[in-house]
Amino acid sequence: MTLTPEDKTIILDSIRDIPDFPKPGIVFKDITTLLNNPRALSTLMNHLTERYLGYDLDYIAGIDARGFIFGSILADRLGVGFVPVRKKGKLPYTTVAEKYSLEYGFDEVEIHIDAFGENGCSLEGEKSKVLLIDDLIATGGTAKAAANLIDKVGAHCVEACFIMELGFLKGREGFSAPVYSVLEID
Ligand SMILES: O=P(O)(O)OC[C@H]1O[C@H](OP(=O)(O)OP(=O)(O)O)[C@H](O)[C@@H]1O
Ligand SMILES: Nc1ncnc2[nH]cnc12
């Protein structure tokens, strides 16, 4: 279940740095090179599958846009539902929304009110257990807004999972759920 140092290196080496994207001074972590590397992607997804098999999850909520990719693969592997947390104005049914700030601007995310069942509960009235996932946590603004949405619709965010954490931005501080990052950059 724990990643070996070799496994971590395979995943880390597959992610590329793009300086000055989308703004001068930002070093953008590009995960497209992880996605097109089958060895790195399966090393990552095998690890996440093993980690979350024992969590008895009901749903995986993936953050727009790269959280959709990792979240969908993991949801299928675990046999649970996938829920998209989308940027404002994209979801067709009734939504709840949260505004947030990030390393390079402001944005707003939304979720369908019934995404995790009526009032966020199963038919038996239990709060749905949700894993939140995204490619990266920087300031934590996006993921904290997404976790608030899970809470607002009545479900329970059991953990927030990221492929990469920019530790120096301290995004995990004050998070309402446990935070797990596969790779941490100091
Ligand atoms: O921790 P934070 O400071 O909130 O930043 C992390 C967010 O930034 C990136 O997405 P981005 O906002 O660039 O959106 P995109 O997926 O539409 O490119 C990344 O995929 C996270 O969702
Ligand atoms: N440096 C970065 N690379 C990729 N996504 C990000 N989101 C916020 N900061 C980022």
Image: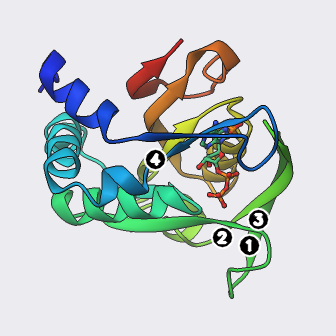
Q: Earlier in the sequence, mark 2 or mark 3?
A: 3
Q: Which residue is mark 3?
A: 96
Name the residue type under label 1. Thr
Looking at this view, is 10 or 87 the one in front? 10
Pointers 1 and 2 in contact (CB under 8 A)? yes
- Taking the image as shown, residue 135 lies to the left or right of residue 10, namely right
Q: Earlier in the sequence, mark 2 or mark 4?
A: 2
Q: CA distance from mark 4 to mark 1?
A: 19 Å
Q: Which residue is mark 4?
A: 133
The residue carrying pointer 4 sits among few (fewer than 14), some (14 to 19) or many (20 or more) residues within 10 Å by Cα, namely: many
Q: Which residue is mark 2?
A: 113
Q: Residue 134 in the image: x percent, y percent?
A: 50, 47
Pointers 1 and 3 in contact (CB under 8 A)? yes
Give SS at disc 1: strand
The residue carrying pointer 2 sits among few (fewer than 14), some (14 to 19) or many (20 or more) residues within 10 Å by Cα, namely: many
What label does residue 33 carry, if any? none
Name the residue type under label 3. Val
What label does residue 95 carry, if any? 1
User: Which image quarter: residue 97?
Assistant: bottom right
**In this view of the protein, can residue 39 be seen by the observer?**
yes
Q: Assign the N terminus to one quadrant of the image.
A: top left
Q: Residue 132 in the image: x percent, y percent?
A: 48, 46
**Could you tell me which residue is drawn at 43 percent across and 37 percent down?**
161
- Taking the image as shown, residue 45 lies to the left or right of residue 98, namely left
Q: Where is 151 relative to 80, above or below?
A: above
**Could you tell me which residue is drawn at 78 percent across and 70 percent down?**
88
Q: Residue 53 in the image: x percent, y percent?
A: 16, 43
User: Of discs 4 and 1, which sits in the foreground?
Assistant: 4
Q: Assign the C terminus to one quadrant of the image.
A: top right
